[in-house]
Amino acid sequence: MDTDAYGYATVSSASGTVNTVAYPPRMVNDSPRLSAQDWTRAALKAIADGGLAAVGVEPLARTLGVTKGSFYAHFRNRDELITAALADWGRSHGEAGLAEYAAIADPRRRLRELLTAVVRAVQPLAPSVHLSLLGDRNDPRVKDAVSRVNQARLNLLTSTYLELGCTPDEAAHRARVAYAAILGLLHLAQTEADSPSPDALADAAAAIFLPS
């Protein structure tokens, strides 16, 4: 049996007849070989640009320069890809992504470095997965992923304010306001080509949100 690059095989029967048999895309060998993470990263870029509706197997395959066979080697369908992409985003932007900051023993230094990193990461006119997902917030998968990321960030901010001497209520309130300000900067960056320097914004954030 010989299988060609498009998922078909020629099979010779006992009578000598040659039949062509189509195989599922999973059988196709793509070059270059892409990993599942390559596909989830491409899906997240599409989500940042246009929400869940922008995630399509054929458009992503064209973007990645492969056939759909590469996709079916890792995922059964589009929904499975979206679920995996949201899981990856949740890990990288939730507890796992915050681990290096949570490991900083000094709460004051931790908060300053966290605020500085977040402010400097905001790029003018850069697409945002987080903000794009809000347009699909009624999708249970999106609601769960965004809630997990939000909660992980609020938990870290709240625990940091507690270590800085705030009462539980004050720590929770400060954490929520600080996080809302961060999301606000991200939102403003979607429509403003010019913004203050990241260093200036980081200094302002530290002055506002670090307890005196």
Image (cartoon, rainbow, N blue to C red):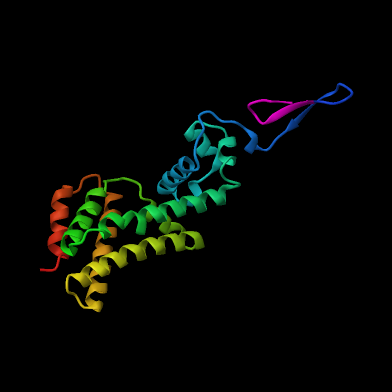
Residue 75 visible somewhere in the drawing: yes
Q: Which residue is drawn at 30% across and 45% down?
A: 125
Q: Compare residues 184 and 198 and report the one nearer the observer.
A: 198
- Counting from the top left corner in percent of width and height, residue 155 is at 31, 67
- Specify whether 140 is left or right of 121: right
Q: Farthest residue toward the left?
A: 212
In the rendered image, the quadrant that contains the C terminus is bottom left
Corner quadrant of residue 100 = bottom left
Q: Is residue 207 magenta?
A: no
Q: Residue at x 14, y 68 (%)?
A: 211
Q: Compare residues 107 and 189 and report the one nearer the observer.
A: 107
Q: Farthest residue toward the right?
A: 15
- Counting from the top left corner in percent of width and height, residue 133 is at 42, 56
Q: Residue at x 53, y 32 (%)?
A: 66
Q: Does the magenta stretch include residue 5?
A: yes
What is the number of callouts on the image? 0
Eyeballing the image, is 41 above or below 10? below
- Counting from the top left corner in percent of width and height, residue 197 is at 16, 47
Q: Compare residues 32 and 62 and report the one nearer the observer.
A: 32
Q: Farthest residue toward the top?
A: 16
- Specify whether 11 is left or right of 48: right
Residue 196 visible somewhere in the drawing: no
Query: Over which residues does the magenta segment extend?
Result: 1-11
- Counting from the top left corner in percent of width and height, residue 147 is at 41, 64
Corner quadrant of residue 14 = top right
